[in-house]
Amino acid sequence: MRPVGVIRALFVFSILVLGGLVLACWYGLYVDRSHPQSSVDIVVPRGATFAETAAQLASRGVIGNVETFRLLGRLRGEETAVRAGEYRFSPHQTQAQVLASLITGGAQVAAWVTIPEGFTAEQIAARLQESGIGPSGLFRRYFLSQSIAVDGAHTKNLEGFLFPNTYLIPLGATPAQVATTFVAQFFRELPRDAASRARALGVNVPQAVTVASLVEREARSAGDRPHIARVIYNRLRLEMPLQVDATIEYALPRHKTELSFGDLKVGSPYNTYLHPGLPPTPIANPGAPSLEAAFSPSRGDDLYYVYCGNGRHVFSKTLAEHQANVARCLH
């Protein structure tokens, strides 16, 4: 055969091979429905890469070929668009359908929901709605109307006992189901000797959790938490008004970054400038560091603190010292 003929034959052969590969790839992505052979549930962790997700899908038999699946994601520019969560894949889907389900959430049955430390019940309800779990109004009403038994006492509602964490929550979960999950985590995080610690501080466990919620909303650094807790307990012991700004913020219909003098006179039982003692309920849902601070405050006789920048507060024992700190830190 002449050289030109050989080249032409090789070219035709290459085209046929390439065409066969393209056809096989197309078939595997858009036609082949041999996977999965039965319904499969997969949890895509938060932060998982597309390659890790593809490998998990292959190992569980949802797809038959990792490389073609990754190629599809790369060609569509959807490698970073996969939603974390739990998925249920029905039998006999194409790889293209599987990818579409991961991108649109069409097969999603549960979503990862992160509840930050210090969120109120209302903020948690809004986060649940944003995550597709259900209407915020339903969750808010449930959270603020139910009570639990803690240390022999019934709480007024669930504020303070919905532990901040990252949860995998089924889509369409009821408020009762979600609350049960959050509260169960709270009890797991509560110190085992919480009751004895609280009594040593002159309070019960729900009251200590209320202190933790004040610490959560007031502190801006980990080191300040035990000190702020000590100030609160010292004031309670002396029957001094707590004068915690965060309690007034909780009472206001809308959050404010700065309170006015008028706000300090708001007629609410949460106004700790007007009403002595702790507010009726926690004002937020504290995380583990604030709970630990409330049950193990630092030692000392400080009665005042003021924020002085750089994430730290300064503490003082007398009003004169406090006024000097205010002048130095706020002017």
Image (cartoon, rainbow, N blue to C red):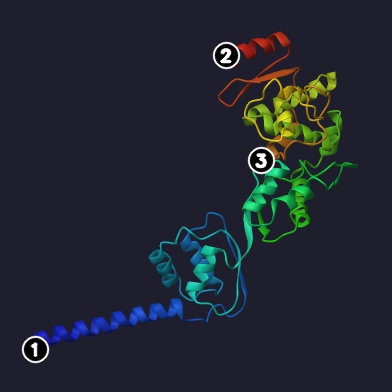
Q: Identify the secondary structure beneath mark 2.
A: loop
Amino acid type, residue under disc 2 in the picture: His
Judging from the image, what secondary structure is the residue with disc 1 in?
Answer: loop
**C-alpha separation, residue under disc 3 versus residue under disc 1:** 78 Å
Indicate which disc, 1 or 2, sits on the residue closer to the N terminus.
Answer: 1
In this picture, residue 133 sits left or right of residue 153: left
Q: Find residue 318 and report its horizontal and vertical position in percent.
A: 73, 11
Q: Where does the C terminus fall, quadrant-wise?
A: top right
Residues 201 and 39: in front is 39
Q: Quadrant of residue 238?
A: top right
Q: Is 157 placed above or below 112 here?
A: above
Circle 3 residues within 10 Å: few <14, some 14–19, many ≥20: many
Foreground pick, 302 / 125: 125
The residue shown at (75%, 33%) is 251
> Callout 3, which amino acid?
Glu
| Residue 227, quarter of the rendered image | top right
Of residues 119 and 117, the one nearer the viewer is 119
Question: Within 10 angstroms of label 1, few (less than 14), some, or many (20 or more) residues?
Answer: few
Residue at image mark 2: 331
**Residue under the point 76% across and 26% down:** 266
| Direction from residue 186 to residue 150 in the image, left or right | right
Q: Which residue is mark 3?
A: 117
Kindly report which numbered mark, 3 or 2, lies closer to the viewer in this rendering: 2
Camera-near label (3 vs 1) is: 3
Residue identified by numbered label 1: 2
Q: CA distance from mark 1 to mark 2?
A: 94 Å
